[in-house]
Amino acid sequence: MPTKILVIDDEESMCNFMEIMLAKEGYKVDTVVSGCDGVSLLKEKNYDLVIADLNMPEMSGIEVLKQIRSFKREQDLVVMTAYASVETAIEAMKQGAADYITKPFKVDEIKLAIEKIINRRQLQLENETLKKQLQGDNSFDNFIGASEIVAKLKKLASRIASSDSTVLVRGESGTGKDLIAKAIHHHSPRCGGPFITINCAALPEQLLESELFGHKKGSFTGAIRDKEGLFKAADSGTFFLDEVGNTSLAIQVKLLRVLEDKTIMPVGDTKAIEVDVRLIAATNSDLEEEVNAGRFRADLFYRLNVIPLHIPPLRERNEDIKLLTDYFINKYCGKLNTAPKSITPEATELLMSYHWPGNVRELENTIERAVLLNRIDTIGATDLGENIRNTPPVGVVQEAQPATPTLESIEKAYIHYIMSQTDGKKAKAARILGIDTSTLYRKLDRYDLKKTSEPGADKPRKHSETK
């Protein structure tokens, strides 16, 4: 679509010249010979650029500028003047002119002035579009759910986004803690700054300390140069510290310093560095239990727990499963470039009745696999994973349970069932459950199921083995 330009000049010969010259450059040009006509035309039509003479009898170029600003504040305008002076140029720029040129001008001068303004405007529009896309990709609407518990969660998260307070996001693995953290950042005053994230469970202690706080050259074997830590990289933005419950006591001391003093100390350095960072931490651990056990500092826990947010597990918002299923089917049909698919009532019922220990992440993986492997336009029960189709026997789930089992007792029985089916192989069991191996270890400890984690633990022992 060609760029549209309006030329306002009381000299008809100048209007004709500008129209011919600019039309040759591919612009669509309208011309008027009075400021009043120009203002009237601008109220009816949109132009990418206005070029107006400053010295006109009925309405000066300065007055045209003022009139345009009253109803089109973002309109780009270049003024022309035969009376070259600093005063007229300054006055025009004060009123919002994008540029000015003096008569007589060279053709290349007006071409260059127009190109600069059009290119700048295009870049501005692209940046605005990109910003909207980024905000859209990280909006609270991307946390899919219509249940009351999710609506309350998103309302609270939206309210706290504008503050600079520390947030502790709690929830099981796969519930979407990272989505909430990103949305809080992108709706906060820090949205123009970086959003840095790290999973504390993914790195050993020494490497995690170096990644978080940086290090000085020679501070340890392999430190061949100075390294800027992620806290420094997150300066003026937000740092999302995932699985903070997996940090060592030594690192917890350093995290406490960040929250209390807003400073970090790189490994091997003696000089503190100031950082301006909002911290959002997340955990699937019971931090109160970790504090009581002496594995997590109480003072750090209270510093992190300024604003607690609890992400509910999928089993507690069962009414969202159908909504999430449809969302993921559409997402992966588009991503995998396949024809749109639907899901059968039988398959939906299986999804609704499944326990989802891996939460939304497990559901997403299930749907992605079903869309990829399904060769027809309907996803059926046979397209779902074996662990979903073959739910645990009723006797296993209900053994020694009250008439109305608790969610905790159901989880304990289900983990026991999976561990027995995998002969106590933790890595395989964790994959089926859709959780991290470290999470499985904690749950085995919590539910006193360590015996089921030993290969052959559920098999009867020979007489010679019993003493």
Image (cartoon, grey):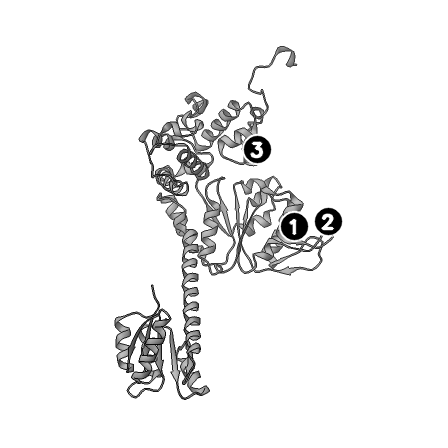
Residue type of the residue flagged with mark 3: Tyr
Q: Which residue is mark 2?
A: 220
Q: Is residue 318 left or right of residue 362?
A: left
**Residue 375 spot, x, y in % from top left:** 37, 32
Asked whether residue 73 appears in the rendered view, the answer is no
Residue type of the residue flagged with mark 1: Ser
Q: Which residue is mark 1?
A: 210
Instruction: Measure how far apart labels 3 and 1 are at the Cα level.
Output: 26 Å
Earlier residue among tags 2 and 1: 1
**Residue 280 spot, x, y in % from top left:** 52, 51
**Mark 2 Cα within 10 Å, few/some/many (few <14, many 20+)?**
few
Image quadrant in which you'd find residue 97 = bottom left
Residue type of the residue flagged with mark 2: Phe
Q: Which residue is mark 3?
A: 441
- Out of 347 and 283, give the one closest to the viewer: 347
Image quadrant in which you'd find residue 129 = bottom left
Dividing the image into 4 quarters, which one contains the C terminus?
top right
In terms of secondary structure, where does tag 2 sit? loop
